[in-house]
Amino acid sequence: MTSIAPRPLVIAVDGPAASGKGTIARALAAHYELPHMDTGLLYRAVALNLTRWGGDPGNEFEALRACDRAGVSPDDPDLRSEIVGEVASRISAYPSVRAALLERQQAFAAQPGGAVLDGRDVGTVIAPAAAVKLFVTASPEIRARRRTEELLASGRRVHFDDVLTDIRARDRRDGGRDAAPLQRAEDAVLLDTGEMSRDEAIRAAIALVERKRG
């Protein structure tokens, strides 16, 4: 009797900046023992390369050149800086940059056992056939408060109003770009983490995955 191999479990976790999607994606990957990719780190790596060799974020050709130099360690502390995040948000609007990084993202999602990926276009572009899609969100004010607390805890001097302005600007860029805009996939389950603690959000995400898996 021929056995049927189980379907790979690909989980797509999308959402705006500071919504908690990265925390949830890492927890899901650990829970289901799957590899995890933060697709936003790819864009941050390109942004960091671009800034380090003095490239212009406003020049699509220079941003595309930086994709070939994306050998930044995921442990590089500069990847998480606000400046790099700002540049990453700008260059992610370039179709050529998105196309250059798409192949490696799709290859990661196509691993035999499955994978967990988080970003802004995982469920709509990178892995539209994912078994489970979550769209994680919260209000701009809540997300700005979380980001402010995170940055203050890391020793950086920031102000809530400045972070909120940045969050809203990123939302406009991510949602308004022509290439793979941030949007909820039609079959994605909405998870609003605004009133949830970290542990509550993770438990809710696991419950949603289990429900989708049947």
Image (tube, rainbow, N blue to C red):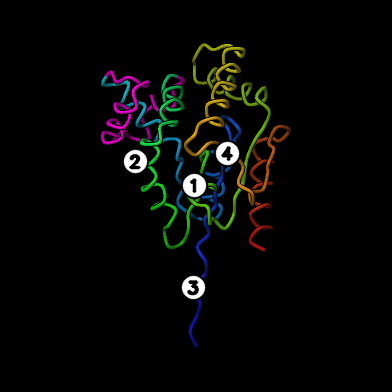
Q: Is residue 177 above or below residue 123?
A: above
Disc 4: which residue: 21
- Measure the C-alpha gap from mark 3 to mark 1: 26 Å
Q: Mark on residue 100?
A: 2
- Considering the numbered disc 2 on the image, is that residue within a helix, a strand or a loop? helix
Where residue 95 appears, as percent x and y from the top left, is 40, 36
What residue sits 70% from the left and 32% below the top? 194
Q: Amino acid at mark 3?
A: Ala
- Measure the C-alpha gap from mark 2 to mark 1: 14 Å
> Mark 1: few, some, or many residues within 10 Å (few <14, many ≥20)?
some
Tell which of 7 and 28 is nearer to you.
Answer: 7
Q: Mark on residue 125?
A: 1
Is 92 colored magenta in this rendering? Answer: no
- Tell me which segment is drawn in magenta: 54-82
- Considering the numbered disc 1 on the image, is that residue within a helix, a strand or a loop? helix
Tell which of 100 and 12 is nearer to you.
Answer: 100
- Measure the C-alpha gap from mark 2 to mark 4: 24 Å
- Measure the C-alpha gap from mark 3 to mark 2: 32 Å
Report if the CB atoms under discs 2 and 1 are less than 8 Å apart. Answer: no
Q: Mark on residue 5?
A: 3
